[in-house]
Amino acid sequence: MAHALLQNLWFHHTDNVELNTITIHHQHVTIHAATTGDRAACPSCGTSSARVHSRYRRRLAHTAAGQRRVVIELQVRRFRCRELSCPRATFVEQAAGLTFRHGRRTQGLHAALQRLALMLTGRAGSRLATRSPFR
């Protein structure tokens, strides 16, 4: 019951991510998770592939929880593209609603920082973002 509740709390916006563990430290919270989809589409040609090349962990900054910084350690897979004419030999799966290409923060944190920058502009937004637990 508790696991399903935490899964829904942290990953309600994406279907292909499974929560493994949560570690709460004095200054930050680390969420360990993994993608669960069996296939991914190549971003260059759109061909769907189930052939896994390798796996690795992405560390994503996430919005703060209870004045603590949150980091998601997400295990993702690198797939081989099945299309022989595609210039991309391998590609990394993205978790819709959570990650974006080459991103080091979640889509939620990215959107919050963009809104902060637009509302406060310039130096005031920079000072607030530096002091906030978002970073």
Image: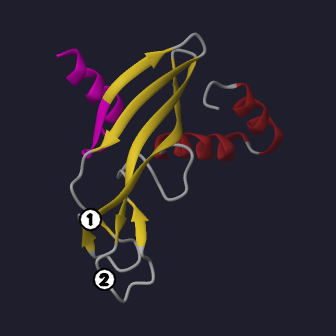
Distance from the alpha carbon under mark 1 to that under mark 2: 12 Å
Badge 2 density bin: few <14, some 14–19, many ≥20, Cα 10 Å: some
Quarter of the N terminus within the rendering: top left
Give the residue displayed 38% in from the left and 56% down from the top.
54
Question: Most extreme residue toward the front, as rendered?
Answer: 53
Q: Check residue 15 for magenta coloring.
A: yes
Which residue bears the numbered disc 2?
83
Which residue is under mark 1? 51
Name which residue lies at 35% across and 80% down: 45
Residues 99 and 108: in front is: 99
Q: Position of residue 113 (x, y in %)?
A: 61, 41
Comes first in the chain, label 1 or label 2 = 1
Q: How is the image coloured?
A: secondary structure
Please tell me how many numbered marks the rendered image carries.
2
Rendering coords of residue 100 (x, y %): 47, 55
Q: Which residues are magenta?
A: 1-19
Image x and y of residue 16, in percent: 26, 46
Membership of 60 in magenta stretch: no
Q: Position of residue 25 (x, y in %)?
A: 53, 13
Q: Nearer the viewer, mark 1 or mark 2?
A: 1
Q: In the image, is residue 22 above or below residue 98?
A: above
